[in-house]
Amino acid sequence: MKNLFKIIRKIILFIIVMLLLIVACFVATGYSMYQKALEEKPIDKMIEEIKSKENYTKLEEMPKIYIDAVIAVEDHRFYDHRGVDYFAIVGAIINDLSNQSLIQGGSTITQQICKNVYFTQERKLERKIAETFMAAELEYHCDKDDILELYINTCFYGNNCYTPKEASKLYFEKEPSEMNDYESTLLAGVPNAPSLYNPIYSMKLAKERQAQVLYAMIKYNYINEEQKEAILAQGENSNDN
């Protein structure tokens, strides 16, 4: 019996060592991807490229409710983490395992910038690790408001719109600062799936996504139920596509 226990312990130890080696390989590959990407485009150059966009939109141009909506639905601990939200990652892993598919990634706003600018949308572990290293680099160089401003200008809003200013002018014929609460929360949901959730393609789907945004805003105490109803009342005259 003692010999059997020794064999089992050795097998378990071997499995643990192999798993650690596999993880180390993924981390090394991800770190190499991060270093290569950073060498090709340093953080300051990346920031300069984004800010040179013709319709680059400053954070102060956006209604506060738009900013609140983006944080609530995309990364509600944005101001509390340093680029990576480990609670969100654990939650995403649990959700993915329960659904037996890679549905959620637990990416923060900072990580999404890195994914949009430096890496592909592929759901690979080494890419995720590279993205994590890059997020830490970006957080080191920029404060939170700067990162948030970069984020809203690296999202795709559908119909060839790559900044909030382009999107607000196309969808609402308004400057960003002129959007009301209804329009702001509608636009905040579009980047999740811009080909589906933009108001030109389908106002019905855009409103369904907006409902998710408003739910997140209530959940994280940005608005209450009464305020949600007031926001939706502003769009009562909108027609579904």
Image (cartoon, rainbow, N blue to C red):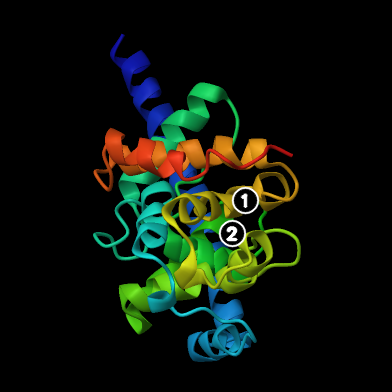
Q: Which residue is mark 1?
A: 124
Among the 4 quarters of the image, the one containing residue 89: top left
Q: Is residue 99 left or right of residue 193?
A: left
- Amino acid type at circle 2 is Arg
Badge 1 element: loop
Q: How many marks?
A: 2
**Which corner quadrant holds the C terminus?**
top right
Question: Dot 2: within a 10 Å radius of its alpha carbon, few (fewer than 14), some, or many (20 or more) residues?
Answer: many
In x, y percent, where is residue 90? 37, 40
Residue type at mark 1? Answer: Lys
Q: Is residue 17 above or below residue 81?
A: above
Residue 127, label in figure: 2
The answer to whether marks 2 and 1 mark residues whose Cβ atoms lie closer than 8 Å is yes
**From the viewer's perspective, is residue 28 above or below residue 24?**
below
Horizontal side of 62 relative to 131 (left or right) equals: left
Q: Nearer the viewer, residue 208 or 102?
A: 208
Q: Position of residue 205 (x, y in %)?
A: 65, 37
